[in-house]
Image: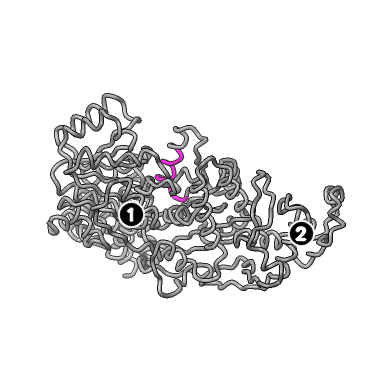
């Protein structure tokens, strides 16, 4: 069995070795057992069900929430010679009937379905007449009502265990804390499943969190410095900010497209396809974008607002650097983000328990932002994983933050909140603290308060950061009036009485951080770099001929291996990681010819 899996890995997918728990998962699933697999984005989750589906008799059914991406996933498999298809609402009825006949006739290795389609009685009846190899439930964290991608339909997928008890099932996700894991097991009836939890660490991603003002300008400096021509994703909290940021990037000369739920389906699909197929394009999006995106060369993920939880942050940043190359997770956020997210939690009609859990998740996210120590250690600890040493590849490791005794300044801010009646927002309070000559302050007689003008030692931007940290540390709360009013929290008493001190991190100035080299990337010599660019051009030419994303032809990592190894024959080309039988047959000669021309040209120049 292991030998067959190894042969499939090499012959079809072009890889020589399994990674992490892949082989154990494949053996368990192929032998008929159920599996819960937690693997980071880019960790090779799809192979864990694709290979068993090929080894077991029947068709593997993949449950995916991503209708917009099914065609790309199926095209990528078909490029490898795998008999794959999908059924969803984008297909004409005649095409759907054809695929259903293929399914009944045993002519498919894998069939992709959305949960809504799967739960139809007609689909369940169709599957009951089919020989099934397995069920793969992708993005299984969607089952959790505490999660950031909750899909109610996922909670009904336990019926697979009832209707098809003899068919093995695998649930896969890249993001799940302990609470979410247990909910996946409970909701999907996977109590007997073997659990495989891989390391959540993505050492090739550099984490940077910045709370300085003017996030858009800071984003631009980051892009110009680190990624002047790379593809990436910029996440914003609102649709309006998505549109404005995309327009602004285009005005600056960087091609960017918006993506959010307010756009019609055709526009979203078009923008998504352009992002997958074009090089150097930036997508600006709400969280509606990204889950299941297989684009391997996303070099950065930037956030211009605070994510709602560490799970959301990890899931979104994990879309960078899927190919193992150096990538950035960069974020800028501010006080208003904290207020907005807290108001969102308070204003929802959800049960009190949901509000409490959501509030706890937001507090953990804020704790990660205000951290002084290694961010990666804290991020992994959230998922119950220990990193023994600081990572050396996050902003706190590369530029250790300074701290300052903020006790007296914090008492001034808290006193100002109290003396103004706990009914004003941060901007007004800062105007009082800094003694601003303002008609509204005079009208409220707040220019006569003892706290008026007592904060001139700090700039308005510094007061804003201080108040944000008081919020994140639990000394202040937002009122439920919907206007962002601040009020004292119970925790502030000791600080106000002088019985507690408070050390806070100083804002870090933007500095160029030294990129840590990735073990998965080898530097190319100038001639090899030139060849790499030529191979990328050839790949893009072939991709356009077939209307495919370039990475479906070959990943960048495979092109780099070609440049380093410079094969002289198809046999040698077939030894390169990522070149399976079918791709060697389809594309091997064209890439080999380009390599030989470049190599012979270099040798002639040297002679």
> Between tags 1 and 2, which lies in front?
2
Q: Residue at x 14, y 47 (%)?
A: 56
Where 467 falls versus 67 (above or below)?
below
Task: Count residues near mark 2 (Cα–Cα under 10 Å), then give few for <14, some for 14-19, many for 20+.
Answer: many
Task: Count residues near mark 1 (Cα–Cα under 10 Å), then give few for <14, some for 14-19, many for 20+.
Answer: some
Pick the front one: 377 or 240: 377
Which image quarter holds the N terminus? bottom left
Where 223 falls versus 352 (above or below)?
below
| Residue 277 is covered by the magenta coloring | yes
Color style of the picture: one colour
Q: Is residue 289 left or right of residue 247?
A: left
Q: Which residue is mark 1?
A: 555
For the residue labelled by badge 2, is the local secondary structure a helix, a strand or a loop? helix
Q: Residue at x 61, y 60 (%)?
A: 474
Pick the front one: 106 or 350: 350
Q: Is residue 506 left or right of residue 53?
A: right
Q: Which residues are magenta?
A: 270-280
Identify the main secondary structure in magenta: helix
| Residue 6 is covered by the magenta coloring | no
User: Rounded to the nearest whole Å, what is the CA distance between mark 1 and mark 2?
Assistant: 57 Å
* Residue 605 image offset from top left, x and y in percent: 34, 66
Q: Residue at x 66, y 72 (%)?
A: 501
Q: Is residue 494 left or right of residue 114?
A: right
Residue 250 at least partly seen:
no
Sequence-wise, which precedes: disc 1 or disc 2? 2
For the residue labelled by badge 1, is the local secondary structure a helix, a strand or a loop? loop
Q: Which residue is mark 2?
A: 416
Q: Residue furthest bottom?
A: 389
* Residue 471 image offset from top left, x and y in percent: 63, 58
Pick the front one: 332 or 9: 332
Which image quarter holds the C terminus? bottom left
């Amino acid at each position: 069995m292991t030998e067959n899996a190894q042969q499939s890995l090499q012959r079809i997918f072009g890889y020589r070795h399994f990674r992490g728990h892949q082989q154990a998962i494949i053996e368990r699933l192929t032998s008929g057992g159920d599996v819960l697999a937690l693997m980071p984005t880019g960790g090779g989750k799809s192979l864990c069900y694709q290979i068993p589906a090929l080894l077991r008799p029947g068709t593997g059914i993949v449950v995916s929430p991503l209708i917009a991406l099914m065609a790309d996933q199926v095209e990528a498999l078909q490029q490898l010679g795998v008999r794959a298809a999908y059924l969803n609402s984008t297909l004409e009825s005649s095409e759907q009937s054809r695929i259903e006949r293929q399914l009944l006739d045993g002519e498919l290795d894998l069939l992709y379905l959305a949960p809504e389609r799967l739960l139809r009685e007609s689909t369940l009846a169709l599957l009951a007449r089919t020989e099934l190899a397995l069920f793969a439930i992708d993005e299984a964290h969607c089952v959790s009502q505490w999660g950031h991608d909750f899909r109610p339909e996922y909670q009904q997928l336990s019926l697979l265990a009832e209707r098809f008890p003899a068919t093995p099932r695998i649930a896969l996700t890249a993001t799940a804390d302990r609470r979410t894991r247990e909910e996946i097991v409970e909701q999907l009836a996977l109590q007997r499943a073997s659990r495989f939890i891989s390391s959540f660490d993505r050492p090739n991603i550099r984490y940077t969190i910045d709370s300085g003002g003017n996030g858009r300008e800071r984003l631009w400096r980051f892009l110009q410095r680190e990624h002047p021509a790379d593809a990436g994703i910029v996440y914003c909290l609102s649709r309006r900010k998505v549109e404005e940021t995309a327009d602004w990037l285009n005005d600056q000369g960087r091609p960017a497209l918006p993506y959010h739920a307010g756009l019609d389906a055709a526009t979203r699909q078009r923008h998504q396809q352009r992002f997958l197929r074009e090089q150097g394009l930036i997508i600006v999006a709400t969280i509606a974008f990204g889950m299941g995106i297989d684009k391997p060369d996303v070099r950065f993920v930037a956030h211009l607002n605070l994510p709602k939880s560490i799970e959301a942050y990890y899931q979104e940043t994990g879309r960078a650097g899927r190919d193992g190359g150096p990538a950035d997770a960069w974020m800028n956020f501010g006080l208003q983000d904290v207020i907005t997210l807290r108001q969102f939690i308070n204003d929802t009609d959800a049960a009190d328990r949901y509000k409490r859990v959501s509030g706890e998740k937001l507090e953990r996210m804020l704790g990660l932002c205000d951290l002084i120590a290694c961010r990666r250690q804290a991020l992994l600890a959230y998922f119950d994983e220990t990193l023994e040493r600081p990572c050396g590849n996050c902003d706190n490791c590369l530029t250790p933050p300074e701290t300052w005794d903020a006790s007296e300044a914090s008492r001034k801010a808290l006193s100002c909140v109290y003396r103004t009646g706990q009914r004003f927002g941060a901007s007004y309070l800062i105007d009082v603290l800094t003694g601003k000559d303002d008609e509204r302050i005079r009208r409220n007689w707040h220019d006569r308060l003892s706290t008026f003008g007592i904060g001139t030692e700090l700039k308005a931007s510094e007061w804003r950061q201080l108040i944000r940290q008081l919020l994140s540390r639990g000394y202040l709360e937002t009122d439920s009036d919907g206007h962002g009013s601040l009020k004292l929290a119970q925790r502030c008493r000791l600080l106000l009485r002088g019985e507690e001190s408070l050390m806070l991190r100083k804002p870090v100035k933007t500095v160029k951080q030294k990129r840590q080299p990735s073990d998965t990337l080898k530097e190319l010599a100038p001639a090899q770099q030139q060849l790499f660019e030529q191979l990328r051009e050839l790949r893009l030419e072939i991709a356009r001929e077939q209307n495919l994303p370039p990475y479906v032809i070959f990943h960048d990592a495979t092109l780099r291996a070609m440049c380093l190894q410079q094969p002289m024959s198809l046999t040698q080309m077939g030894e390169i990681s990522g070149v399976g039988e079918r791709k060697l047959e389809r594309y091997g000669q064209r890439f080999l010819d380009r390599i030989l021309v470049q190599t012979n040209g270099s040798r002639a120049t040297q002679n």
